[in-house]
Image (cartoon, rainbow, N blue to C red):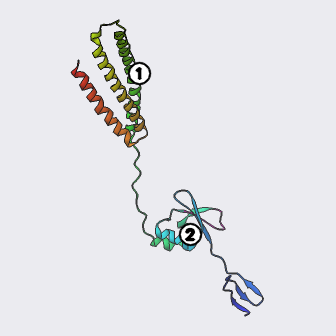
Amino acid sequence: MPGGVCVQCGAVRGGTQARNRPQPYVYTILGSDQQQYGPVDEAAVIQWIQSGQANAATMIHKEGTTEWAAVATFPEFAAALSAAPPPVATAPASTPTQTPKVFGILNILFGILCGICQGIGTAALIALLAAVEAGKIGSEAKPMLIFGVVLSGVAIILLLIQLISGVGLLMAKKWGRTLAMVYAIGYLCHRIFIGQYR
């Protein structure tokens, strides 16, 4: 047959000369995650617009051009943009408050300073207990010294909790706040218990 359209390749045949139909343009989309998607044809871009995956501000590259441009600048997508659902408004991401970080720093600082003091106090109590055992000090002080060492051990555990909670607060982790509350309650109980024996 001298004329007609080739079913396989879409070429228009006329006489001895064959002409190809112009191929559709292909597009590459720059997603909100800064990744390139495509190349795809016009129908795929229209589908992305209709599904909300692309909008008027989405950057797109058309094959044969050198520049990226917003989808709204291409007339072939005007109808799809006008019919597309409005973009869903998302709440702005809340910036984390600086307060937990400040408390985290304070927990770490006080944990270190109080840990040093508590360590010195505990070492002194242990030295006194050793002196009692050696017979250099009267044995009547031994129960009180043992009691002091036990309370110092509890205080050191609480200070470790304070240090770990400080790290958690610096990293804005929920467990940091939980540990800070555990430390606060434990410290209050510790102080009340010591107050009864003074």
Compared to 163, does 136 lie above or below?
above
Residue drawn 49% across and 65% down? 53
- Residue 171: where, in percent of width, then height? 43, 40
Compared to 164, does 47 lie above or below?
below
Please state, as top left, top right, bottom left or bottom right, where the N terminus lies in the image: bottom right
- Residue 32: where, in percent of width, then height? 51, 58
**Direction from residue 17 to residue 158 in the image, left or right:** left
Which residue carries the number 1 mark? 116
Q: Amino acid at mark 2?
A: Phe
Please state, as top left, top right, bottom left or bottom right, where the C terminus lies in the image: top left
| The image quarter in which residue 37 lies | bottom right
Task: Give whichever of 28, 72 is nearer the camera.
Answer: 28
Residue drawn 37% across and 43% down? 174
Which residue carries the number 2 mark? 74
Where does the magenta region start and end?
A: 59-66
Query: What is the crowding at mark 2: few (fewer than 14 residues within 10 Å), some, or many (at least 20)?
Result: few
Q: Is residue 60 magenta?
A: yes
Task: Give whichever of 63, 51 is nearer the camera.
Answer: 51
Q: Earlier in the sequence, mark 2 or mark 1?
A: 2
- At mark 2, the secondary structure is loop
Single out the residue that lies furthest toward the right: 16
Compared to 148, does 172 lie above or below?
below
**Direction from residue 26 to residue 151 in the image, left or right:** left
Residue drawn 46% across and 66% down? 52
| The image quarter in which residue 167 lies | top left
- Residue 178: where, in percent of width, then height? 34, 39
Q: Amino acid at mark 1?
A: Ile
Single out the residue that lies furthest toward the top: 136
